[in-house]
Amino acid sequence: EYTTSGECKLLPPGIQRAVCTQVVAIGLQVSEYKGQTKEQEKVKLRFEFPDHRIEWEVDGEKKEGPMVIWSTYTFSMWHQSKLYEHICQWLGTALNEIEADQFDLDSLIGKPCMATVTHREYQDKTYANITSIAPLMANLAVPEPEGDVLSFNAYSHSQEELDKLPNWLQEIVKKGVENKRTKRDEVKVKAEESYKEATAPADDFKDDDIPF
């Protein structure tokens, strides 16, 4: 988040009221960790924090709204994934394998929560991340979404839906789609090569070549 002066503004650490407003599947993303390259489907959840405000300008017009955190997850509901962990915390109950497999992420859009925000230092920069999620406390007002609510699929969307995403996220989505296309082409080539090897005719030989 940036102020009108262009300075980065971080959410303070602690437990905060929040509401999920967007579920954005960003496609196949490539990352490196400890020298290993990973290709994983990723999804981002957009959280608004109504108790912390920010101002910005659009074409000279001042605007004001809640601060936002985009949380990135591997698109997996495996029982040891961060996405599974946060959703179970949020719901206040553990999902069994079938429930996890059938869980509809879009059901989180508009859903309030208590989000624990922590600060993390990385490459001389400080980031605000959501490290845990809990149900909204009963005595607190339910926050309503102030920005666009959106369910977005990198592989199936309209231009209007894409335009609702910030420019930096549109670029990530485009890269995710490109990575998927490249991966699909690689798989196709390997499949064709395997087929050719499996169906290639054996070398011709004469009976005289048999050593007995």
Image (tube, grey):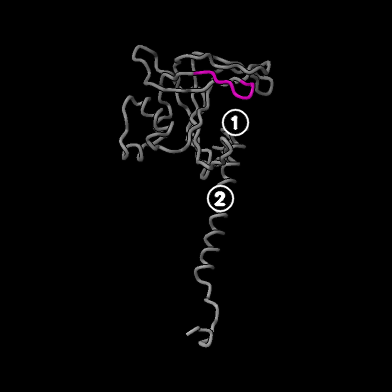
Residue positioned 63% across, 24% down in the render:
123
Q: Residue at left 52%, top 25%?
A: 147
Return the x and y of residue 208 as percentages of the image width and height: 53, 88
Give the overall secondary structure of the magenta segment: strand
Q: Magenta part of the protein: which range?
A: 118-125
Q: Are marks 2 and 1 in contact (CB under 8 Å)?
A: no
- Please tell me which residue is depicted at 48% across the width and 36% down the height of the picture: 74
Residue 166, label in figure? 1
Q: In the displayed structure, does residue 85 sit left or right of residue 170? A: left
Residue topped by disc 2: 183
* Closer to the camera in the image, 192 or 168: 192
Place residue 166 in its image quadrant.
top right
Q: Is residue 135 magenta?
A: no
How many numbered discs, if any? 2
Q: Quadrant of the N terminus?
A: top right
Q: Position of residue 51 (x, y in %)?
A: 49, 13
Q: Disc 2 on helix, strand or loop?
A: helix
Task: Assign a secondary structure to mark 1.
Answer: loop
> Badge 1: few (under 14), some or many (20 or more) residues near its Cα, within 10 Å?
few
